[in-house]
Amino acid sequence: TSPPLPPPPEAPPSAFPLPSPTSPLPSPSLPPSSSPSPPLPSTPPPAPPLPPPPSPLPPGAPVPPLCMATEPLIGHFVVAYVTEGRVLCAHRRCSIAPVGHYYTSPGGATDSCDFSPCDPLPDDAAAFYVPGFANQSDHCPSMSCTPAPPGYQLSSSGTCAIEPCRTAKTGEYYTDGCNVSMCYPPGPGRLLLDGTINTAGARTSPDSCLSGKCSE
């Protein structure tokens, strides 16, 4: 028989022992806080009450001479207010001029500025005056409209609305707005018919005039 084998050598001890599979892992620990938690913000104090708004002078009270030291511009007048025992001076626009007029003088201490008619608008401009402020004759507020198509005209209500023309006679068609010209002859066996109310696409060219067959 062969002699018995020698026992295996023992493993050297590990420098870093591994944890047992059944042992729990160590939980990390946070360092203790060295500073206390900041205090919660407190409710801000209420805002101080607003001062009362300026109040106008009583009706009929004269404007203080201090406010009249500076003459208002053309189209403006002087007003005075009282607030916290003090008098405040201000200039306001006059508001009495009709549409199409401009102011020619200041109003002093009352809304009484003088005014005159604005410069006429160009005849070829589809425009009209609108409410607003002006103190120069050529700077009055106005509105320009798109020119009306053939057979229509701007209404006279001070807007850009249009209305149909009713001026064309038998044998006429609309060329520009309510301007008219003569239609082409209708051809053999036909005659031009009366139709003065223009509709979209009708009677706006010399060959679109209304016509009908001649009765035999």
Image (tube, rainbow, N blue to C red):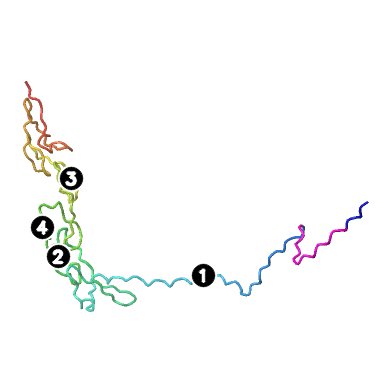
Of residues 134 and 20, the one nearer the viewer is 20
Instruction: Answer whether labels 4 and 3 touch (C-beta < 8 Å).
Output: no
Query: Which residue lies under the disc numbered 3?
Result: 162
- Give the quadrant of residue 212: top left
Return the x and y of residue 204 as percentages of the image width and height: 13, 38
Query: In the rendered image, which quarter contains the C terminus?
Result: top left
Question: Residue 83, relative to residue 212: is it above or below?
Answer: below
Task: Point out which mark residue 43 bears.
Answer: 1
Q: CA distance from mark 4 to mark 3?
A: 22 Å
Task: Point out which mark residue 136 bears.
Answer: 2
Residue shown at 7% from the left, 28% from the top? 187
Q: Earlier in the sequence, mark 2 or mark 4?
A: 4
Q: CA distance from mark 2 to mark 4?
A: 13 Å
- Give the quadrant of residue 209: top left
Task: Point out which mark residue 120 bears.
Answer: 4
Which residue type carries mark 1?
Answer: Thr
Mark 3, other Cα within 10 Å: few <14 / some 14–19 / many ≥20 = some
Return the x and y of residue 104 as percentages of the image width and height: 13, 67
Which residue type carries mark 4?
Answer: Pro
Q: Earlier in the sequence, mark 4 or mark 1?
A: 1
Of residues 110 and 16, the one nearer the viewer is 16
| The stretch drawn in magenta includes residue 18 | yes
Left or right placement of residue 48 versus residue 113 in this view: right
Number of marks present in the image shown: 4
Which residue type carries mark 3?
Answer: Ile
Mark 2, other Cα within 10 Å: few <14 / some 14–19 / many ≥20 = some
Mark 4, other Cα within 10 Å: few <14 / some 14–19 / many ≥20 = few
Q: Earlier in the sequence, mark 3 or mark 2?
A: 2
